Image (cartoon, rainbow, N blue to C red):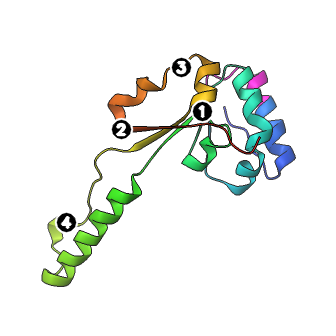
Amino acid sequence: MEATANTSQEVIAAASSLIASKVDAVFTPTDNVIMSSELAIYEAFMNANIPHYAGADSFVRSGVFATCGVNYTDAGIKTAKLAYEVLQSGFKKSEEFITLDGSIITVNTEVAEKLGINPDIFADFGQVVTVETTGK
């Protein structure tokens, strides 16, 4: 199910619509309008026992349950090494892309507890970082 919103009020209405439809989970993309509304909607999802996932770890500090993202430190190191190699020996056709090992899964412990989900379930999928909701 999809719900769209262009304003903070529409985000709140969309969240209410998703809750009324009894969705199993919600994913919201990285978007400034949604981010500005997170503190207004996270408790509604939490109280409805609906895990809310997002595209950025900053959202988790605003009440989203969890996100999985790139380890930017590792990405920066790999990028620097690749740039150095290119400067030293040129770009090899066989290295048209690189892959990153692991990821960072950020979990809001306050929301996890309310949902009855142990953050350790993510341990096999990457580095788990736990945070709490800030800015309430």
Secondary structure category for the residue under label 4: helix
Residue 86 screen position, x and y as percent: 20, 78
As shown in the figure, which amino acid type bears the numbered disc 2? Gly
Classify residue 14 as left or right of residue 110: right
Q: Residue at x 57, y 29 (%)?
A: 109
Secondary structure category for the residue under label 2: loop
Question: Which of disc 1 and disc 4 is earlier in sequence?
Answer: 1
Question: Which of disc 3 and disc 1 is earlier in sequence?
Answer: 1
- Please give the residue where the numbered disc 4 appears in the rendered image: 95
Mark 1–mark 3 distance (CA, rounded to whole Å): 10 Å
Classify residue 87 as left or right of residue 127: left
As shown in the figure, which amino acid type bears the numbered disc 3? Ile
Which quadrant of the structure image shows residue 95?
bottom left
- Please give the residue where the numbered disc 2 appears in the rendered image: 126
Which quadrant of the structure image shows residue 76?
bottom left
Mark 4–mark 1 distance (CA, rounded to whole Å): 36 Å
- Please give the residue where the numbered disc 3 appears in the rendered image: 117
* Res 65 label: 1
Mark 3–mark 2 distance (CA, rounded to whole Å): 17 Å
Label 1: how many residues lie within 10 Å, few (<14), some (14-19) or many (20+)? Answer: many
Are dots 1 and 3 in contact, CB under 8 Å?
Answer: yes
Residue 64 screen position, x and y as percent: 63, 37
Secondary structure category for the residue under label 1: loop
As shown in the figure, which amino acid type bears the numbered disc 4? Glu
Mark 2–mark 4 distance (CA, rounded to whole Å): 25 Å
